Amino acid sequence: MHGGLSSVNNFNLDDIRRIPRGNGFQPEDDDVLVDILWSDPMVIGTGIEENKRGGGILFGADVTASFLNRNNLQCIIRSHTEIREGCSCTHPGCYTVFSAPNKSKNVLGGVLTLHTSESENLRLEGFVFQQSI
């Protein structure tokens, strides 16, 4: 997802599937869409807080853990935040990857790849680059 999780009670994948699609539909027409576009994870803290950047919310590690458990997922991968290191784990189960390097701001680009493994779990591998062609 681009941003993060939603403040909708018991938020799950079906809430995302129910978002209307098509011409003329705007993000502000649906609270869940606003949240998954503009929310940010909290590095420290729990629960849900107002996002000072505008739309969406701030969500804690507990919110991520509940969402992952409720939806039988291993992690969420998002991109809405510029990460100097290219990619990071904000809190358990919540990864941010920023794939647009900016040399003048000393921001690296990142790529996360998912690999199958012997177990049922996927293995994530991160790569960082300094510039694009």
Image (spheres, grey):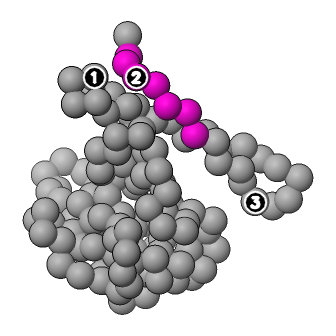
In the rendered view, would you say 81 is above or below 29?
Answer: above
Q: Where is residue 38 in the image (x, y as percent from the top left)?
A: 23, 60
Q: Check the image and name the residue furthest to the front.
A: 106
Tell which of 57 and 12 is nearer to you. Answer: 57
Residues rendered magenta in the picture: 126-132
Q: Residue at x 38, y 17 (%)?
A: 132
Q: Nearer the viewer, mark 1 or mark 3?
A: 1
Tell me which residue sits at (27%, 65%) in the image.
39
Q: Most extreme residue toward the right, as rendered? A: 118
User: Which secondary structure, mark 3?
Assistant: loop
Of the numbered discs 1 and 3, the one sitting upstream in the chain is 1
Residue 12 pos. (x, y %): 46, 77
Marks 2 and 1, how far apart at CA: 7 Å
Q: In the figure, residue 29 lies in which quadrant?
A: bottom left
The numbered mark at residue 121 is: 3
| Marks 2 and 3 in Cβ contact (< 8 Å) | no
Which mark, by number, is residue 119?
none
Q: Tell me the residue at 18%/71% (across/down).
A: 51
Write the residue at 22% across / 30% down. Answer: 105
Q: Name the residue under label 1.
A: 103
SS category of the residue bearing label 1? helix
